[in-house]
Every structure is written in structure tokens, then in C-alpha cells.
């Protein structure tokens, strides 16, 4: 349990996977991330699955940051080094700010369970009052990232929505 008031913050998880969107493979990282967010006290919407397509990713960012804003938008998948991993390229131009220290912490902590964690092109930033995170598509990578976020997630979400929080 955390100090967060239940449902104080809302989250949307989007799985970015062409194979999952086509029904060729089961989405495991999205439901796992959503479950972890519920355990952290966030209210979550059903997981959405989209193909690894820059336009669809950008549309999702705009939808959940500008038109139906949530406190936290997590995208799992599309952060690797392959040519069809396009999530960072779709997200970065739409962010108002990047949280580079969080990105570095997630990659560093990820090395404890996977020596290839630094290959992930994780992106964490803000658009408006929404924190946007692009996490690995592997269940372990997504889970590890949220574990890293646990000690300061409430503080980050509180500050991002514009509330004053004592330091």
C-alpha cells in the first residue's frame, strides 16, 4: 500500500505492439503494468492495444493528454533498438518536458534483473498535466520500471498536476 488516496490519480496503459494488435500474440506487459498501478493506488482504464505506428502512437498521446487527460499515461513496447520500434520517435516531439533522471534511474535499476536493460530507449516526460512514460514491452522490463517509480510516483504526479507538495 501507499500513501496515495485511491482514485486520486488516473492512469491509462497502452500496449504498443503490431503483433498484439493483430491478435498474433497475447499482451502480457499491459495488464501487468495496469495491475501494478492499481496496487499503487491509481484508478486505471482498460488497457488499449495499438500497432507500432507513429501516427497511432501520437494520436494516443494527444487523446490521453489533451482530450481525455489522465494523470499517468504508460506505453509499453516499441522502445527497443529495432527499426520498427517507433514509440520514442512518436512521443518525444509531443512532450513539454523530459524527465531524464527518471529515465536513467529506470535503465540503471533494470540492469539488476537484465544486463540488456540499457538497450531500452525509455522515455519519461510530461505533456500538460500528464506524466507520459514509454516503457519496455517485456513484462519484466515494464514491471521493473514501475518498481523504480514507486518511491516517488505520487510526488511526481502531484507536482505535474500543479499542486504544491512540500519538499
Image (tube, rainbow, N blue to C red):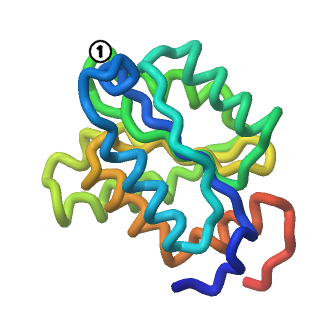
Residue 9: image x %, image y %?
A: 71, 64
Crowding at label 1, few (<14), some or many (≥20) Cα neighbours within 10 Å? few
- Residue 71 position within the rendered picture, expressed as x and y whole percent measured from the top left: 71, 55
Residue lying at 30% horizontally and 60% vertically, measured from the top left: 108
Quick one: which residue is furthest to the left in this view?
A: 115
Q: How many marks?
A: 1
Left or right? Give the position of 59 relative to 111: right
Q: Residue at x 71, y 37 (%)?
A: 64
The quadrant in which residue 146 appears is: bottom left
Where is residue 3, by image quadrant?
bottom right
Rendered location of residue 109, percent (x, y): 30, 64
Task: Report the residue at 60% width, 73% height from top.
Answer: 41
- Residue at label 1? 83
Query: In this image, 17 relative to 5: left or right?
Result: left
- Element marked by disc 1: loop
Q: Is 92 drawn above or below residue 107 in the view shown?
A: above
Residue extending furthest toward the right: 163
- Residue 63 is situated, as x and y percent measured from the top left of the image, at 73, 30
Residue 91's place in the image compared with 161, above or below, is above
Foreground: 28 or 84? Answer: 28
Q: In terms of depth relative to the viewer, which is nearer, 45 or 2?
A: 45
Residue at image position (68%, 75%) is 6
Q: Quadrant of the C terminus?
A: bottom right
Name the residue nearer the viewer: 134 or 69.
69
On the rendered structure, is 156 left or right of 107? right
Please state which of residues 118 and 77 is positioned toward the viewer in this rendering. Answer: 77
In the image: residue 140, left or right of residue 46: left
Amino acid at each position: 500500500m501507499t500513501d496515495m488516496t485511491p482514485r486520486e490519480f488516473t492512469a491509462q496503459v497502452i500496449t504498443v505492439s503490431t503483433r498484439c494488435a493483430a491478435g498474433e500474440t497475447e499482451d502480457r506487459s499491459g495488464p501487468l503494468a495496469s495491475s501494478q498501478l492499481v496496487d499503487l493506488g491509481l484508478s486505471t482504464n482498460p488497457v488499449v492495444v495499438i500497432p507500432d505506428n507513429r501516427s497511432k502512437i501520437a494520436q494516443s498521446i494527444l487523446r490521453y493528454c489533451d482530450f481525455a487527460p489522465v494523470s499517468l499515461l504508460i506505453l509499453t513496447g516499441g522502445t527497443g533498438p529495432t527499426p520498427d520500434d517507433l514509440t520514442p520517435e512518436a512521443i518525444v516531439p509531443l512532450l513539454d518536458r523530459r524527465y531524464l533522471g527518471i529515465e536513467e534511474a529506470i535503465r540503471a535499476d533494470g540492469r539488476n534483473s537484465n544486463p540488456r536493460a540499457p538497450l531500452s530507449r525509455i522515455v519519461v516526460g510530461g505533456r500538460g498535466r500528464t506524466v507520459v512514460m514509454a516503457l519496455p514491452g517485456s513484462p519484466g522490463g515494464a514491471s521493473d520500471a514501475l518498481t523504480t517509480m514507486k518511491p516517488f510516483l505520487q510526488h511526481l504526479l502531484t507536482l505535474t498536476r500543479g499542486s504544491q507538495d512540500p519538499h
